[in-house]
Every structure is written in C-alpha cells, then in structure tokens.
Amino acid sequence: MKAHLSDSFLQTLCALQVIRGHISDCELSAADVAGSVYLNPIYLNRIFKKEKGCSISQWIVKERMELASTLLLTTDRPAVEVACQTGYNNYPYFSTVFKKYFRMTPSQYVRKNKSS
C-alpha cells in the first residue's frame, strides 16, 4: 500500500523550498512564494497554516532567525553582516526582530551561547 501525500502537503513542501532558496532576499514575501509555486497567495497561506501551524510570513521570520542564530554562533561575522545574509538590510529592524524572537539582542545571544 502506497502512502498518499495530500496536495496541500506537497504545495507546502514546494513553498518551503522556495523560502529556503530565497531566505537572504530582503524582498521575500508570502506573495512572492505563492507566485513561485503558481498558487493564489490567500489559498497558499491557508494550506500552509494548516500544514505548519503558522503563516508564511511567520515561517520566513522563523527561518531567518534560525539562520541568523547559526551564523552568529558558528562564524565570526558581525551581526550587521548576518542581518544582510538573512534578508534584513536594516540592522536596527533585524535587531528588533531578533530580540523579539530570542528575548535578547544578537550580541547578548552570542555572549550567552557561543562556545569559545
């Protein structure tokens, strides 16, 4: 018996691939993701939320913050450069989003978590 993958699961998987492939693009939006997978943005957001439990925009922030965390802890790149590599051209905004996500600033996060 073959496992059946739902259309919404496959469409969400395609959307995730687009997000991961364009995570450093500061213009990346839910509408861009939907366009890349040839779906209506409202429809894609609905099925994405059903499959992943959050909106596409929230997922983009999650992916960017996880990438930022990895880069901050595994490289010696300054936070300003990490911000650019994760799709944030405005460092103060990156820092605000980072602080909201991790409950500390990027520099506090590095001091607390980076092994010497």
Image (cartoon, rainbow, N blue to C red):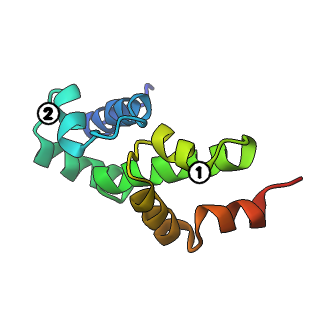
Instruction: Please state, as top left, top right, bottom left or bottom right, where the N terminus lies in the image.
Output: top left
Give the labeled residue for mark 1: 79
Quick check: can you spot residue 114? yes
- Left or right: 47, with 111 as reference point: left
| Of residues 52 and 72, the one drawn nearer to the viewer in this rendering | 72
Residue at (46, 41) in percent of width and height: 84
For this orientation, the residue located farthest to the bottom is 103
**Circle nearer the N terminus (2, 1):** 2
Q: Is residue 42 above or below residue 105?
A: above
| Of residues 4 and 33, the one drawn nearer to the viewer in this rendering | 33
Q: Amino acid at mark 1?
A: Ala
- Left or right: 42, with 1 as reference point: left
Quick check: can you spot residue 5? no
Q: Is residue 29 above or below residue 11?
A: below
Q: Choose top left, top right, bottom left or bottom right for residue 9.
A: top left
Element carrying mark 2 = loop
Q: Label 2: few (<14), some or many (≥20) within 10 Å?
A: some
Residue at (50, 62) in percent of width and height: 98
Element carrying mark 1 = helix
Of labels 2 and 1, the one closer to you: 1
Residue 101 % position (x, y): 50, 66
Q: Amino acid at mark 2?
A: Leu
Give the labeled residue for mark 2: 39
Residue at (16, 30) in percent of width and height: 35
Residue 90 % position (x, y): 38, 52
Q: Is residue 68 above or below residue 35?
A: below
Residue 111 % position (x, y): 76, 64
Residue 48 % position (x, y): 28, 48
Q: Label 1: few (<14), some or many (≥20) within 10 Å?
A: many
